[in-house]
Image: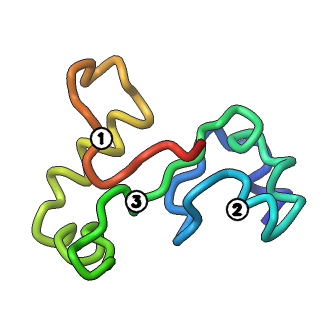
Amino acid sequence: MFAKAKAADLWIGVGSFKTLQEIETSEKRYALFKPFKDKNVFTYNARQGAKGGSEFLELGYLRPDIILKDLVKIAHPELLPEYQLYFHKRLE
């Protein structure tokens, strides 16, 4: 995985990790990835339901338009300057 992904510009969909520190703690080599160094790591768990479930997993299949807008905003923010991410968020 490292050989193919180390130079990627973005890392989207990091599972249940909530911070960059959590990712690095789980596997030190992740900190060597370019998107990690550039802080271009995104989770799709920005919103949690009332019982803690992922709204992305619960609602996303009904709203592919929102998922697409999120991905466009992440990859090409200049195309949607006013749009705020809904399902996704950048990890700190």
Residue at x 18% of width, y 50% of height: 66
Q: Amino acid at mark 1?
A: Leu
Of the two numbered discs 2 and 3 in the rendering, the one whose residue sits closer to the viewer: 2
Q: Which residue is mark 3?
A: 44
Distance in Å between CA atoms under marks 1 and 3: 10 Å
Disc on res. 34: none
Q: Amino acid at mark 2?
A: Glu
Q: Position of residue 3 (x, y in %)?
A: 85, 57
SS for dot 1: loop
Above or below, 47 against 66 in this view is: below
- In the image, 21 versus 69, the foreground residue is 21
Residue 22 horizontal side relative to residue 87, left or right: right
Above or below, 47 against 50 in this view is: above
Number of disc labels: 3
Q: Quadrant of residue 71?
A: top left
Residue at x 21% of width, y 21% of height: 82
Residue 52 horizontal side relative to residue 39, left or right: left
- Locate the N terminus and report the quarter of the image it occupies: bottom right
Above or below, 19 against 36 in this view is: below
Distance in Å between CA atoms under marks 1 and 2: 22 Å
Q: Which residue is mark 2?
A: 22
- In the image, 67 versus 7, the foreground residue is 67
Disc 3 crowd rating (10 Å Cα; few below 14, some 14-19, many 20+) is many
SS for dot 2: helix
Whichever of callouts 1 and 3 sits on the residue coming sooner in the sequence is: 3
SS for dot 3: loop
Above or below, 66 against 54 in this view is: above
